[in-house]
Amino acid sequence: MARVLTPRAEDFPRWYQDLISKAEMADNGPVRGTMVIRPTGYAIWERMVSDLDARIKATGAENAYFPLFIPESYLKREAEHVEGFSPELAVVTHGGGKKLEEPVVVRPTSETVIGEFMAKWTQSYRDLPLLLNQWANVVRWEMRPRVFLRTSEFLWQEGHTAHADEQDARDYARRILHEVYEDFMVNVLAIPVTVGRKTNRERFAGATSTYTLEAQTGDGKALQMGTSHELGQNFAKAFDISFSAKEGGQQFAWTTSWGVSTRMVGGLIMVHGDDNGLRVPPKLAPIQAYVMVVKDGDGVAEATDRVLAELRAAGVRVQVNDRTDTPFGRRAVDAELKGYPIRIEIGPRDIAEGNVTIARRTDGSKTPVSVDGVTKAVLDALEADQKALYDQAVVARAAKTTDAATLDEAIEVAGSGFARIAWDKVGVDGEAKANQSAVSVRCL
Amino acid sequence: MARVLTPRAEDFPRWYQDLISKAEMADNGPVRGTMVIRPTGYAIWERMVSDLDARIKATGAENAYFPLFIPESYLKREAEHVEGFSPELAVVTHGGGKKLEEPVVVRPTSETVIGEFMAKWTQSYRDLPLLLNQWANVVRWEMRPRVFLRTSEFLWQEGHTAHADEQDARDYARRILHEVYEDFMVNVLAIPVTVGRKTNRERFAGATSTYTLEAQTGDGKALQMGTSHELGQNFAKAFDISFSAKEGGQQFAWTTSWGVSTRMVGGLIMVHGDDNGLRVPPKLAPIQAYVMVVKDGDGVAEATDRVLAELRAAGVRVQVNDRTDTPFGRRAVDAELKGYPIRIEIGPRDIAEGNVTIARRTDGSKTPVSVDGVTKAVLDALEADQKALYDQAVVARAAKTTDAATLDEAIEVAGSGFARIAWDKVGVDGEAKANQSAVSVRCL
Ligand SMILES: [Zn+2]
Ligand SMILES: [Zn+2]
């Protein structure tokens, strides 16, 4: 079989680009650094959104929507903040057919606007906790764009909450970290993430603690999949988010912020993809079972209808492909590329014996199964393959994680994987030294 | 009771603004013409999105995401098109810390980009129909903004489809019109919409037919709730969306486009709102039953838990308010403003007799109901009130619709309602005359 993608071992970044394009995940947009998310890729993002959204709501947070445009003056308010973003900003200077009196910035985050409104909506302890979340597009001008990983426009979720005391804010930031993000990544994305705190050097400006979830990609690199910040009272002081306390007197709130983005789609590809394409974990997969008519013939249509109906009734997300005007081989390669967990191939030869073929994307196996047994076989395979993908990722990460005794050793190892080292062997000076070798301390 | 809102009869636009603000639906954003959609308003939009999204997917369409930024040159390509938008465009001239070589426009619609990519993705008849939809924010600079109805940034859905022949495109545009939009508006929003074609004068540039759905607001005005366009081969020719036909030869596709926006939230308020606030139809309502603890006392907590559990088990969307540290009257006014269909008031006095009070927002009635009977009473009331809201809107529209015998009569009547008149009494000249009197022909 002709090779479809550049093999990962040959050139990992090229493999990634090939996959994005041939699996029809995304295209580059006409403006440099932007992307067109095609239906195959967008359906994966939608599934991420709907699962995470339910978890976020279960913590009590509510969704809201803040404007795309932010007055330039807002971003000058908090100096520390602007320095981090300034070269990343897209600035609108013309609107309504003329030059604007004050330019407006396309939001790089909604943080400043949300801070303004949180201050307005927080008057009394009765208004707390104030738990807000937003799903939206944001723009950070990107000089070296890579689809899904670093794009000038991306889709994300940003949560901002205000609490009456420090413990409540801390508990909430950790609840988001573990119950929302970590549990989702481990149990739905089947990605083992390393969860911990960032060093002072790496943490978010204004945060008192930044928690991170780091995945290891197929080439041994770390990819930040999400963050959750405790902001202490820093943010509340900058935006004057204060309230009359239950016990009397005016106090500043304790706030948190947290987010994940379309970068997770890139992470998913880089963790689970193989040389034949993507492998989507069953729990996430928009299409779990892809029913392919190999060729028309006696009993094929009947078997197809029956299999579809039974799988749907069992709650399996199915799609049928009966485009027999396209060669079967081409359709099968396309299904492999897109990573549907299970393919059910139905053709006259198998059907004559009462069988269909079940092809599992995770291990590449192909097994004949009687039409009667399809639903059970599919349900079993979906469950097993969800676990198998996670287990494989754990093994791959272990193979590329080395315990290092000294800082120099850790720096060397980090060229092709993770190094695990005691923080007291690194310290602030060691971290600076590691950074000079393009190695970062990802997680404590 | 002190009046909470300006009465509709006194000043309808003012009533609308009061309601938006006091029901915490939205705030004005810091950049003129933008809005902050607060959780109460956003939850309504989310319910609209999720219902419509399922309907759109049931037609076979897939969601995708196209970039926020469009090269300025794209909008110059189709001259007819640009003239319509030019003063409405927001233009980004700076990005990455410097002036851009080519300015980019913030999408007023994604039509041009989607056209480009549809051309790329459409090669053969096998690629058709190509059914795409996008949920996104768009920007059209607005000189006279009104929250939800006309804002510089709004949220919407835009569908774009390409078909192999005219009949398929026509059928699809009408399927969206009736099965997706009309059925949703009538059966979920409880809004009687007048559905029909636009005149040549009013139709979308480039369309061969524009279908519209028009609601009548509480002050007798028409509000366009959605449109579906047949574009013939005009759009395909402009973007070179062509394909090799089954019978051989290259052909241009037949396309459609269709959309609804956050304006629907404004329409909902203007159709169903009354002098006490919003009334949300039960099928749409994010919160269908609002369980309010009037005051703590013997048996109150137990009854509350039981009512909540039983309603949840029956599939009712419930929320509890047990903030007895806030006066009950204030909480009840707030619940009226936000328009929860049912309030269940639980206090010690009623509970002593085994009862709770069920307050229905639609007719303002308050009835004691035994704790045993709550779930049935709520389910019955939700069903009845969905119908009652629709029926009331039908009656209100009929009261403000007059059959006119002549054009002059129609123009006069249209000052305070709808005029129904035979098109042969209007014609192209009559339409121009009506327009001079600020009356438009909305629907054929
Ligand atoms: Zn954990
Ligand atoms: Zn109809």
Image (cartoon, coloured by chain):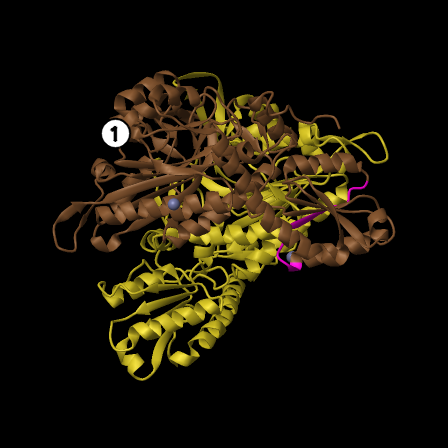
Chain colours: A brown, B yellow
Give the residue displayed 48% in from the left and 72% down from the top. Answer: B379
- Give x and y (percent) for residue B92: 44, 24
Q: Is residue B322 left or right of residue B365?
A: left
Q: Is residue B348 left or right of residue A391?
A: left
Determine which residue is flagged by label 1. Answer: A77
Magenta segment boundaries in residue numbering: A313-324
Q: Residues within 10 Å of mark 1 (few under 14, many from 20)?
A: few
The secondary element bearing badge 1 is classed as: helix
Give the residue displayed 64% in from the left and 45% down from the top. Answer: B61
- B77 vs A419, nearest the viewer: A419
Q: Name the quarter where the N terminus of chain A is drawn.
A: top right
Above or below, A133 against A214 in this view is: below
- Give x and y (percent) for residue A150: 47, 27
- Give x and y (percent) for residue A434: 35, 20
- A209 vs B235, nearest the viewer: A209
Quadrant for residue A73, please give it: top left
Q: Name the quarter where the C terminus of chain A is drawn.
A: top left
